[in-house]
Amino acid sequence: MNNSISRYVYRVEWSPEDREYIGLCSEFPSLSWLAETPEEAFSGIRALVDEVAHDMEANNEPLPEPLADRSYSGKIHFRTTPEVHRKLTIRAAEAKVSLNRYLNSKITSTL
């Protein structure tokens, strides 16, 4: 298995429409693997990504960089409506924190 493939972001979710677990890889959003158990979905998506990566390497195609290996600035540029901006600013003022700190606490509480 290619070393960078082991650093890709994998997840397994229940698929209500398929009534099976689905294995996914963030770096290869078009790939998925359905299975009866989470473990089978996980190993299936990893094997599929490995196969696709080998084909890409054989064709001299670049592999996606693992999300975990990328450098992040910590800055997110976010657009919203003026009304939502006003409401968020008011909530931040009521909490006696900056808008940035308020938004950061809201975002991190959902992770």
Image (cartoon, rainbow, N blue to C red):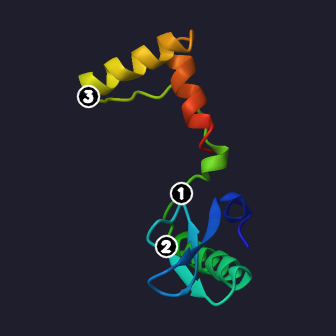
Question: How many C-alpha atoms fall within 10 Å of the one at disc 2: few (<14), some, or many (≥20)?
Answer: few
Q: Distance between the residues labelled 2 and 3?
A: 46 Å
Please tell me which residue lies in front, 2 or 17.
Answer: 17
Q: Residue at x 49, y 73 (%)?
A: 59
* Residue 54 locus on image (x, y percent): 60, 75
The x, y position of residue 74, in whole percent, is 57, 27
- The amino acid beneath tag 1 is Pro
Q: Report if the CB atoms under discs 3 and 1 are less than 8 Å apart.
A: no
What is the spatial separation of the Cα atoms under label 3 and label 1, in whole angstroms? 34 Å
Amino acid beneath label 3: Thr
Specify whether 54 is left or right of 28: right
Q: Residue at 48%, 65% (x, y): give it.
A: 61
Tell me, yes or no, whether the two marked residues, 2 and 3, touch with CB atoms within 8 Å: no
- Mark 3 lies on residue: 81
Tell me the number on the disc at residue 111. Answer: none
Q: Which of marks 1 and 2 is in front?
A: 1
Residue 16 shown left or right of residue 89 in the figure: right
Vertical side of 26 occupied by 86: above or below: above
Residue drawn 32% across the image and 18% down it: 86
Front-lying residue, 54 or 68 = 68
Q: Which residue lies furthest to the front in this view?
A: 94
Q: Mark 2 points at which residue?
A: 59
Residue tagged 1: 64
Q: Is residue 60 visible?
A: yes
Residue reaching furthest bottom? 36
Which of the two marks, 3 or 1, is nearer to us in this view?
3
**Amino acid type, mark 2:** Asn
Residue 83 place in picture, x, y as percent: 26, 24
Q: Position of residue 20 (x, y in %)?
A: 57, 86
Q: Which of marks 3 and 1 is nearer the N terminus?
A: 1
Q: What element carries label 2?
A: loop
